[in-house]
Amino acid sequence: MQFNVRALSPDHLISQLTIDAQDEVDARRQVEARGLFAAKVSLAGGMSRGLSLGKQGSASSNLSVVLFSQELLALLNAGLSIVEALEALLEKESNQGTRSILGRLLTGLGEGKRFSGVLAEQPELFPALYIGIVKAAEGTSDLPRSLTRYIDYQQRIDTVRGKIVSAMIYPMILMLVGGGVSFFLIGYVVPKFAEVYKGAGRDLPWMSKMLLSWGQFSGAHTSLLLSALGVIIVLGFLTIRQVIASGSLGRVLTKLPGIGERIRIYELSRLYLTMGMLLEGGISIVPALETVQGMVSLNIKHDLQLAKESIQSGIPLSTAFEEHHLTTPISLRMLRVGERSGEMGAMLTQSAAFYDGEISRWIDRFTRTFEPLLMAAIGLVVGAIVVLLYMPIFDLAGSMS
């Protein structure tokens, strides 16, 4: 395709260029390679389609790094070169966004760049960890093995994450159903009963009076209460999203008794697994720590930075991790064994596997305990509402008998 580009030179002169490129990203890259700044990119003879993060984001959503790695690994194991494998993937691909990504990779390789280099040109698609293991594999000429490590690594993380999500689904459904039933009883059934009891002229129990007073109020201000509920839900959603984005949720959870320690174990497990994969891939300790720092929480990141500085001063990794609270009694012993045997990467991976199993067992125990308690709490709330509604009827039946 041809693109019209309005470019700005270093001496602030504006020029119009026509570029043959695969897409807007490729056109902008070609212009920047000439030392110019692409101010505006548009299709030749078409409407302007400026390059934006939204476009890049849509492209990234069309590419699964794990699926891409699995397909590439299968072709490399079949004996194809990296260029032939990418060409085969390009030929079978029908999605235009993914074809554009594969085309940029092939163009970069055709220009003589290393595979890790062309991956690094698209950081919004390929994470630093992936680029790092590919770069290490280029030094050992063993890309298939590194891809296998990354696939196993991502599948293990997805397995633990999937268990956590699955454990949350059923309680969330229970809370939604229980909340919906309670809201229906309080917002619809209670006002109806309030109208019935309003002219009965009988002395009602105190708690029933309170419930029926609420029923009369909600029946008279239904639209106002629904509007307030909607506002509360929206504000709650925005607040939760802000808390998650700022990282405050993690800090709050880590302070909860029982849960905080499990979250710390989960974070250390991810740290050990990532570090182990990088070390097994041929990356030295300090570069591996620098790569991992962008993937951990703020608390772990600070401790990891201090540990890196200690390691750079000559302190062993196990000692540095112990001093900065990045170990547990079991992982510390395994790290020391790894230092003596020279298999630090394998020991880190085994430590992660040990704690993944512990986390999975804790999730199972927690869900088996929490779900019945949640069902009992919902049953108590709904049952209390029903009993308070029918207490005047029980009283009336008793007086008649």
Image (spheres, rainbow, N blue to C red):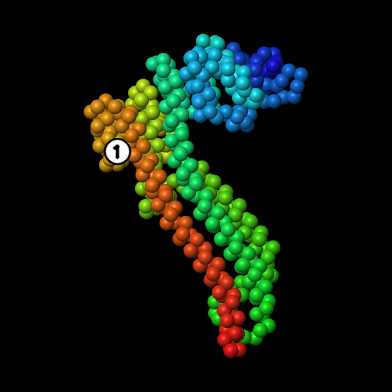
Q: Amino acid at mark 1?
A: Ser
User: What residue is disc 1 on?
Assistant: 331
Snapshot quadrant of residue 54: top right
Give the residue at x 68% y 76%.
195
Looking at the image, the residue that sits furthest to the left is 340
Vertical arrangement, residue 356 with respect to residue 391, above or below: above
- Residue 120: percent from left, percent from top: 50, 22
Outermost residue toward the front in this view: 78
The structure residue drawn at horizontal position 66% and vertical position 67%, both measured from the top left corner, is: 188
Residue 391 appears in the picture as rendered: yes
Q: Residue at x 28, y 40 (%)?
A: 330
223 over 274 or under it: above or below: below
Left or right: residue 254 versus residue 238 is: left
Percent of width and height locating residue 193: 65, 75
Which image quarter holds the N terminus? top right
> In percent of the image, x 67 and y 73: which residue is there?
192
